């Protein structure tokens, strides 16, 4: 991750950490950048000349093989909205446009690799004092970058801390299109069936700016479904807060600049952009884009994967990682009445001490996490330099490692997995990794 010491000066969309891009430091950075770019071009040219390197020159992967493809069945108008949102999602903001004064990254796409899972360098630090968001000391999130003249945020003492990997954004429209009743049908908070699993919804109050006409909006309580602890019910709220917290962009929904409340001094005119810095249409464009992003298609079935699917169910993995839920009516036909194979019940579960962050989030306690959807794992490595970073903080580098770290309500499933012969474990892992 980037540490809270990097001063940012926007230059051609690039960022620097650890120094401002002025004077000798800027000159060194520019010389280093030119050398680096020249070296990359030379290496690529040599690779193409000697080896062919067809992958460098191939066209964009087909839909189903990437994270930024539109849903099937969108009409021409919706596809136009999708493309407009795609552009906005990738827009890198400058200081003149309102970036900062404190922030985590310059664009939505910077944190979500190809619209998929984030990488350790993009990890976010959330903190609070119990259920108190610690706004007086800069909570609930550390912004580890800042523009010239601002002061970096530092983690205050005496707070509960949780590291969070940026989640994928594909398929969120399908998750939004699931009715509260469909999600609640999987609840069993008192473990009435005695299977040791007691999932429950995180019932949350939407932000005041989310109208009742917006999915997940109104006065609440509503079923939380977004975020590592299902602490957000509305895609509008998720989008607005990401712009405000992660990029430092104000809007009519969040018109007050996010600043370091512990800064020793404030530089006049630090933020040259008038508030609100974002138009509502820009937020709507990104929200619609994410709403219409398709999840990747699962891999082909093999005998081993069929075997793995059976073992996945018999070990009770599917009790939380529910294979399929169905959407209802929706104004976007491509989201209506569809089977959603996300492999999650979107409920909170106690996953034991090893994964506990001991930080409440809404009604979720420090041991509870939303069941992570498994879709998209098949191609995740392609967008993360051949690596996987699983669980809320990315500590697990393989499906096997992630399984072994589960505890609490998942202890029975883990014990069943550990009791399997190696070939059965391999089949289950292959199945999960093919989703």
Image: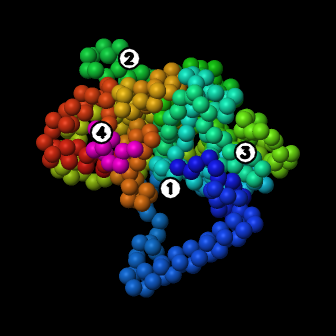
Q: Is residue 371 left or right of residue 11?
A: left
Do tag 4 and tag 2 residues touch (Cβ < 8 Å)?
no
Region in magenta: 395-404
**Residue at numbered disc 1:** 114
CA–CA distance between discs 3 and 2?
45 Å
Depth check: 187 or 274 in front?
A: 274
Q: Dot 4 lies on which element?
A: helix
Q: Earlier in the sequence, mark 1 or mark 2?
A: 1
User: Few, some or many C-alpha atoms within 10 Å of disc 1 (few <14, some 14-19, many ≥20)?
Assistant: many
- Judging depth in this view, the residue of 323 and 159 nearest the camera is 159
Label 3 packing within 10 angstroms: few (<14), some (14-19), many (20+): many
Q: Which residue: 37% across, 82% down?
A: 51
Q: Tell me the SS state at disc 3.
A: loop
Measure the C-alpha gap from mark 1 to mark 3.
Answer: 31 Å
Q: Residues within 10 Å of mark 2 (few under 14, many from 20)?
A: some
Cβ atoms at labels 1 and 2 below 8 Å apart: no
Which of label 4 and label 3 is nearer to you?
3
Q: Secondary structure at mark 1?
A: helix
**Residue highlighted by disc 4:** 403
Q: Main secondary structure of the magenta part?
A: helix
Which mark is nearer the camera, 4 or 2? 4
Q: Residues within 10 Å of mark 4 (few under 14, many from 20)?
A: many
Return the residue at label 2.
189
The residue indicated by pointer 3 is 151
């Amino acid at each position: 991750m980037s540490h809270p010491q990097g001063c940012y000066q926007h230059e051609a969309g690039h960022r620097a950490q650890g120094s401002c891009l002025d004077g000798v430091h800027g000159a060194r950075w520019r010389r280093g950048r030119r050398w680096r770019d020249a070296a990359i071009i030379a290496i690529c040219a040599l690779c193409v000349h000697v080896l062919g390197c067809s992958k460098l020159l191939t066209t964009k992967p087909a839909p189903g093989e990437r994270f930024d493809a539109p849903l099937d069945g969108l009409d021409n108008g919706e596809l136009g909205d999708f493309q407009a949102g795609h552009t906005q999602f990738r827009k890198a903001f400058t200081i003149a446009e309102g970036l900062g004064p404190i922030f985590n990254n310059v664009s939505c796409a910077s944190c979500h690799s190809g619209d998929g899972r984030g990488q350790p360098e993009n990890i976010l630090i959330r903190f609070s004092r119990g259920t108190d968001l610690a706004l007086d000391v800069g909570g609930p999130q550390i912004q580890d970058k800042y523009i010239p003249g601002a002061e970096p945020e530092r983690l205050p003492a005496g707070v509960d801390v949780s590291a969070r990997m940026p989640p994928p954004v594909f398929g969120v429209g399908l998750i939004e299109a699931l009715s509260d009743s469909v999600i609640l049908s999987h609840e069993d908070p008192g473990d009435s069936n005695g299977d040791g699993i007691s999932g429950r919804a995180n019932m949350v109050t939407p932000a005041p700016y989310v109208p009742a006409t917006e999915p997940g909006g109104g006065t609440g309580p509503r079923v939380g479904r977004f975020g590592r602890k299902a602490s957000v019910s509305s895609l509008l709220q998720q989008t607005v807060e990401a712009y405000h917290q992660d990029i430092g962009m104000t809007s009519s929904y969040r018109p007050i600049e996010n600043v370091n409340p512990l800064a020793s001094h404030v530089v006049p005119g630090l933020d040259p952009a008038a508030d609100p810095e974002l138009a509502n249409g820009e937020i709507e464009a990104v929200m619609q884009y994410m709403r219409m992003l398709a999840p990747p298609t699962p891999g082909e079935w093999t005998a081993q994967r069929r075997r793995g699917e059976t073992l996945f169910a018999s070990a009770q993995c599917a009790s939380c990682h529910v294979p399929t839920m169905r959407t209802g009516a929706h104004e976007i036909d491509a989201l209506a009445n569809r089977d959603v194979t996300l492999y999650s019940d979107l409920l909170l579960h106690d996953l034991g001490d090893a994964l506990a962050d001991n930080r409440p989030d809404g009604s979720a306690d420090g041991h509870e996490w939303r069941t992570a959807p498994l879709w998209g794992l098949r191609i995740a490595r392609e967008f993360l330099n051949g690596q996987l970073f699983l669980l809320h903080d990315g500590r697990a580098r393989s499906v096997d490692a992630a399984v072994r770290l589960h505890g609490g309500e998942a202890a029975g499933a883990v014990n069943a997995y550990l009791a399997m012969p190696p070939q059965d474990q391999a089949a289950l892992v292959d199945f999960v990794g093919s989703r």
